[in-house]
Amino acid sequence: MNALVASILTLGAAVAIAQSAAPNDAQIAGIVVAANTVDINAGMVAKSKSHDKEVKEFAQRMITDHTGVNKQATALVTKLHVTPEESATSKSLKDGGVANLKHLGTLSGKAFDKAYVDNEVTYHQAVLDAIDKTLLPSAQNAELKDLITKVRPAIDAHLQHAKEIQAYMK
């Protein structure tokens, strides 16, 4: 699979988020967990495969930050007695994550670093779009909406950081 195919798969997940019918809170929780897990898994691969200091540090930040968000989301849904629910969007995110990992597994060196960082830019932009266009407008529970609102700046910071790394790699 080439980088274009991987990008299309990532964009497919983004489109699924943006075009999905308004998800309920249980589905939003499932989307949040899936989105974070996809990025944690990619970060783990990047941390182990990359030889670039910036990429490795960024990957560790993704692992740390997204693990933290998943812990917050899990604590919240436990408190609210809500079970995260699978949806077409969360399934699409997971499928795209698996495809991305397979693609990354075929690469090494600078090609790996570029593919990982390019995907992180696309992925974080897609997540921001989903937050703004679907998740926040659809969330009914105030605490869930508050959690999403609180993590949005971190997602934006991840996007900006990934773009900085992307720029220096060119």
Image (cartoon, grey):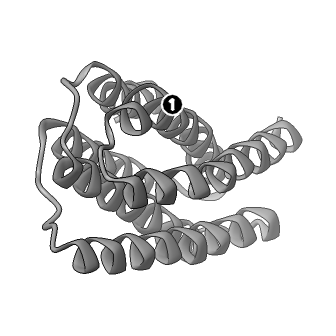
Task: Give the class, few, some or many, for how many residues have Cα within 10 Å of label 1's Cα (few <14, many ≥20).
Answer: some
Residue 110 spot, x, y in % from top left: 69, 51
Residue at x 80%, y 70% (from the top left corner) = 53
State whether residue 103 is above or below residue 75: above
State whether residue 145 is above or below residue 16: below
Residue at x 38%, y 24% (from the top left corner) = 8
Q: Quadrant of the N terminus?
A: top left
- Whether residue 7 sits left or right of residue 150 in the image: it is left
State whether residue 91 is above or below residue 62: above
Residue 27 spot, x, y in % from top left: 18, 48
Residue of label 1: 132
Q: Nearer the viewer, residue 102 or 67?
A: 67
- Whether residue 102 sits left or right of residue 95 in the image: it is right
Residue 63 spot, x, y in % from top left: 54, 73
Q: Quadrant of residue 32?
A: bottom left
Q: Nearer the viewer, residue 11 or 31?
A: 31
Disc 1 element: helix
Extreme right residue here? 168
- Amino acid type at circle 1 is Asp
